[in-house]
Image: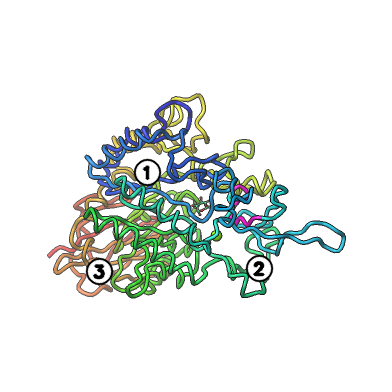
Amino acid sequence: MDSDGDGIGDINGITSRLEYLKELTIDAIWLLPIFKSPMHDFGYDVTDYYTIDPEYGTAEDFEHLLKKANELNIKVVLDFVPNHTSNESEWFIKSLHRDEYYSDWYIWENGYLDSKGYRRPPNNWISVFRKSAWHYVPNRDQYYLHQFGISQPDLNFRNPVVVEELKSIIKYWLEKGVAGMRINAVNHFVEIDKDLFGGRYPDEPKTGRPGYGPDDYEYLDHVYTKDLEETYDLMSQFRDVFDAISLRDNLTRVMMTDASTGIKNAVKYYGEGIHYGAHIPFNFALIEDLTKELDARDMKYAIDRWLTYKPLRKPANWVTGTNDIGRVASRFRPELVDAFNMLVLLLPGIAITYMGEEIGMVNGFVPWTETKDQLACNTDDPVNFIDVSRDPVRTPFQWNNGKNAGFSAAEKSWLPVAEGYEHINVASQRSAVRSHYQVYRTLMGLRLRPAFRLGRYESLALNNEVFAFKRWYNDDAYVVVMNVGRTYQVVNLTAFDLIFGQLEVEASSVLSTRTFSDNVHANYLDIGADEALVLRMQV
Ligand code: GLC
Ligand code: MG
C-alpha cells in the first residue's frame, strides 16, 4: 500500500493496512528488504543495513509500524540480505579504494590477459543473473565477484570481521523489537577456499544441460560457489545471535532462511545436533516439484518427500509463492487457488502466504518498456524476457476496483496493476458470499483446531486426479480432498483408516456446488474438476 502517492508501497501504507492482516488472523508479516538501496534489484542491493530507504519511510515510521503491529499482536520479520551489498555502499566504495579496514570485505581477484592481449575474468563463473560473475573495476585494477547482479558485489565470508558485522546488524534489528529475519540467498554465502587450488579460484564444470548457453547460470554446475559446507556453520553462528537476544528479553525470535537448492541441502538448514539452524528453512516443494501438468500422485509425492527428509521433530513449512515465483493462479490455473491455500494452511506446519495469494491474484503483464527486474533486463531480449521476469508477481496489491486497484493515489503505480483487479480485490471478495478471501479466512479458522495444530497426517492419491489428506487428533478427524484434474471423479474416502459414514463440509472451493454443513458419504464422493473440500467426520 502506497501512503504518500508516489506510486511505490511504503511503511506507513503497511501500517494503515494492518487491520486487514488482523482480519485474516495472520500472526506475522515478513517484509521484503526495506533498507537503503538504489533499488537495482528491488532492495536486494543494500547500501546501508541500519537505515530505512526514504522511498519506504523513516526510522520513526518503522517504530510506528512496530508499535501498531505489537498492539494487534502481529509480529514483524525483516528480510536480511547478507550475501552481497550494493556497489554503492560505503563498504564497497572503501574496499574499492583499498581502504585498509575494508579492502578485504569483498572477493577481489586479478584477471589475466589472453593470448591476444585482451583482459579476461579470473575464471568461468557465471552469475545467477546471467553472464560472467566477475566485474572489472579500473580503479582497483581488479575484478570483484557478484553471484547476482553487477550492482551486487558478494561479501567475503572468509573474513571474520565481515561475519561479525553481519551479526551486529541482526542484533541491532532484533533489539529494536523485530521478531525475526528471513535471511536471503544463504547458500551463496561462501565460495571455495582458493588456497586449496594454489591461490586461484578454479573453473566450475559444465552441466551439459541441453538448452543452456555459456551466458546462462544453468550452464555450469556450481560446486565452488553454492551449498558449501561452511554455510551451515555460519547459520548456527547466526542462530546463536537470535537465541542470545531471546534469552535476554524473553521474546520469541524466528530465523528464516531462503535457499534454492536440493532437498538434502535444504533440510540441513534446520541444523544438526546442538548446532541449531533456521526455525523456518523455506520449503519450495510446492513450487519446484510441481508443474502445470501436476496430478494427484505428483502432489502426494512432493509433499511426502519434504516431510520425509525434514528432521522428525522440527516443524514443516509451506510456501506457494514468493517475490520471485509466478502466482498460483498463473503457474497452475485460477481454479486451483483454493486448493493450494488448503495445502498451505492445513498441511502440518507453518503456513507462508505471499501477498495476494489469499485473493487469488494472477501474474501481471509488464511490457518490456516498463520492466524493472534486472534479471529480465539482462536478457537484452524484448520478447523472451517474459520467461524470467519477476515483475509479473510483484505488481501492486489489489485492494478495490478503483484507480491502481486502490494501491496508490498516484497517476501511475510503480508497476502496472494486474489484469482482473476489478473482481480480484479485497473489497469485492470481502462482500461476496463466496470468494477466495472467504475461503482463506475459513481455513485460517480451521487451522486453530487441534486436528490441524497438533494432529497427525496421512495422504493418498485416491486416483490420478484426486489428492486427499487426513488430519486427526483423537476422535476429531478431517479429510481435505481436491480434484486437480479436468474431469469429474468418484472416489471412496474409506480408503483412509477410520473414515466412514458421513462427513460434513467445513470449507469448499469457490466453484464447488457444496457449501458449509452439507453432508457427503465417505464411500461415494462425486467431486467436480478443480473442486476442493475440507470435510469433517461425523461421530
Ligand atoms: C533472493 C531474492 C531475490 C533476489 C536474490 C538476490 O532470491 O528473493 O529477489 O534477487 O535473492 O538477492
Ligand atoms: Mg557469496
Secondary structure of residue under mark 3: loop
Colouring method of the image: rainbow
Q: Is residue 490 magenta?
A: no
Left or right of 152: which side holds 355? left
Left or right of 213: which side holds 337? left
Secondary structure of residue under mark 1: helix
Residue type pointed to by label 1: Ile
Q: Which residue is mark 1?
A: 359
Range shown magenta:
144-151
Which label number is shown at residue 201? 2
Residue type pointed to by label 2: Tyr
Residue type pointed to by label 3: Asn
Q: Main secondary structure of the magenta part?
A: loop
Secondary structure of residue under mark 2: loop
Distance from Cα at disc 3 to Cα at disc 1: 33 Å
Vertical placement of 220 versus 88: above or below?
below
Tell me the residue at 62%/72% (across/down): 195
Q: Quadrant of the N terminus?
A: top left
Q: Which residue is mark 3?
A: 523
Q: Position of residue 211 (x, y in %)?
A: 68, 63
Vertical placement of 315 versus 516: above or below?
below
Q: Is residue 148 magenta?
A: yes
Of the two numbered discs 3 and 1 in the rendering, the one whose residue sits closer to the viewer? 1
